[in-house]
Image (spheres, rainbow, N blue to C red):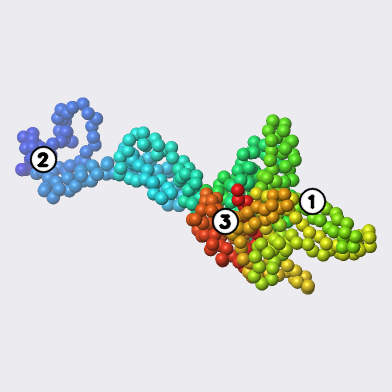
């Protein structure tokens, strides 16, 4: 023991201490080294001399085992966690995060289940590869393409509305009434190649763009197309440029007259292309009337023919009917006119020369008082579902009510326009009597009998379609 304390020790003591202690590659004092395989040496912690003599205590062994376990867990976590720099802050960090190792996951498989109007993917059902291709090829508006034509409007009526961002209810109501006239829309659509060739037909182009988005659920798209249509109409009618409330009858008349105005140029363009062009307004809503004036003194007559796209009828005080208003319009009235014979009074009457496919009647609900104040006449009107119109050459034609524009409100300074229209997929004689109420973006189902009963005080513009 004296030799050990003085630093002198034998090789045997060292070997005994080494056997009791952990295996060490080399000792710091002895020059001997244990042969090890050709591996890069790893730096190890220096063990004190008393541990080499007497071995590690059990508490220290446990601590070293914990350290080894912590080192193994740290090496695993290094792959997942980044070593953040000292200057790292939450607000500004220019170090891009490391890409985590993505584990390969099986793709989800879907099948299409038709629920009411839409195709809904269902998870957890295996599909064949051929069916997966069909699922990927389904367009955005699958419901609109899958539903048959004659049930399409009935099934998707909630998508038929138009948003109203800035007091455009008068325009929305007019468009909905025009869209119920299928022959009018089809006439424009079938001649697209002709009117696409001239820039003046901007009204037709924007009108058909709105029609193509009719079943769309994208409200932003509809707002954009409606604004473009209003801008196109305002080129020839600047009074509709601003965002104030306007009269629906004036807007409708302006649209129809603009479509008629460039019909001659379109006919010339169609002739150069080897085709023919039929104006959709002239073939659907235009009609001719003959005004006959007869002098009460000498009996001399003069006739003049005029072209109309709609008729404006005076209101009947009390509770009148549409048929009474039309009769009052056609009957003879007194007129102050100086004839060559010296007579001052004359009689004038009007009669239909031709009848349109769709007869548009405007009820004069707004009038001026003797003090030039504009008021609204809220007298109820009995709305005839069927209307017989006489013509000298044809005898008479029967018309059926298919749409109407209503002004909701009691004053002329304010109000709101809505539209009631028949479902074009249903014939007028169909017992279902299915109609729709278009209140801007809000569309509801109704019936023709309910419309005629509830719109007696608000009916403003009526659309009657000729029955074959």
Between label 1 and label 3, give the one nearer the viewer: 1
Does 287 sit left or right of 408 as displayed? right
Choose the circle earlier in sequence order: 2 or 3: 2
* Local SS, label 1: strand
Q: In this figure, which residue is indicated by the disc labeled 1?
A: 305
Q: Visible in this render: residue 53? A: yes
At x 64%, y 70%, the residue is 319
Q: In this figure, which residue is indicated by the disc labeled 2?
A: 21
Distance from Cα at disc 1 to Cα at disc 3: 32 Å
* Contact? badges 2 and 3 (CB < 8 Å): no
Choose the circle earlier in sequence order: 1 or 3: 1
- Above or below, 268 relative to 305: above
> Badge 3: how crowded within 10 Å, few (<14), some, or many (20+)?
many
- Where residue 58 sits: x, y (%)? 11, 48
* Contact? badges 1 and 3 (CB < 8 Å): no
Choose the circle earlier in sequence order: 2 or 1: 2
* Contact? badges 2 and 1 (CB < 8 Å): no
* Local SS, label 3: strand
């Amino acid at each position: 023991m004296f030799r050990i304390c003085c630093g002198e020790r034998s090789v045997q003591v060292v070997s005994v201490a080494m056997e009791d202690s952990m295996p060490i590659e080399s000792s710091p004092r002895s020059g001997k080294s244990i042969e090890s395989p050709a591996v890069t040496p790893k730096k190890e912690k220096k063990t004190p001399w008393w541990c080499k003599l007497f071995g590690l205590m059990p508490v220290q062994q446990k601590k070293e085992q914990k350290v080894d376990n912590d080192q193994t867990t740290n090496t695993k976590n290094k792959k997942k966690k980044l070593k953040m720099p000292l200057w790292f802050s939450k607000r500004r960090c220019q170090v891009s995060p490391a890409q985590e190792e993505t584990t390969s996951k099986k793709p989800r498989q879907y099948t299409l289940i038709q629920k009411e109007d839409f195709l809904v993917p269902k998870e957890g059902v295996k599909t064949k590869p051929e069916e997966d291709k069909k699922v990927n090829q389904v367009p955005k508006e699958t419901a609109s393409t899958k539903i048959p034509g004659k049930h399409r409007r009935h099934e998707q009526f909630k998508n038929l509305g138009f948003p109203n961002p800035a007091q455009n209810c008068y325009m929305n109501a007019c468009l909905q009434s025009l869209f119920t006239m299928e022959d009018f829309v089809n006439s424009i659509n079938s001649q697209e190649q002709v009117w696409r060739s001239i820039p003046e037909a901007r009204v037709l182009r924007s009108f058909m763009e709105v029609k193509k988005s009719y079943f769309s659920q994208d409200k932003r798209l509809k707002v954009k197309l409606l604004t473009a249509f209003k801008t196109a109409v305002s080129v020839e009618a600047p009074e509709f440029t601003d965002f104030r409330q306007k009269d629906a009858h004036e807007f409708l008349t302006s649209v129809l007259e603009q479509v008629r105005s460039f019909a001659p140029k379109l006919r010339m363009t169609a002739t150069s292309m080897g085709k023919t062009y039929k104006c959709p307004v002239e073939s659907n809503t235009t009609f001719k009337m003959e005004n006959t004036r007869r002098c009460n003194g000498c009996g001399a007559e003069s006739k003049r023919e005029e072209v109309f796209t709609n008729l404006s009828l005076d209101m009947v005080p009390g509770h009148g009917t549409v048929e009474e208003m039309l009769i009052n319009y056609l009957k003879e009235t007194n007129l102050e006119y100086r004839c060559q014979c010296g007579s001052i009074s004359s009689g004038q009457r009007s009669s239909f020369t031709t009848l349109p496919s769709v007869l548009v009647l405007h009820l004069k609900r707004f009038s001026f008082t003797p003090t030039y104040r504009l008021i609204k006449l809220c007298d109820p009107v009995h709305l005839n579902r069927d209307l017989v119109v006489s013509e000298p050459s044809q005898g008479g034609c029967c018309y059926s009510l298919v749409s109407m524009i209503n002004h909701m409100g009691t004053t002329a300074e304010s109000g709101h326009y809505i539209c009631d229209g028949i479902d074009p997929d249903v014939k007028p004689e169909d017992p279902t009597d299915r109609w729709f109420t278009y209140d801007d973006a809000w569309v509801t189902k109704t019936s023709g009998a309910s419309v005629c009963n509830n719109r007696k005080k608000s009916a403003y513009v009526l659309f009657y379609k000729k029955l074959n």
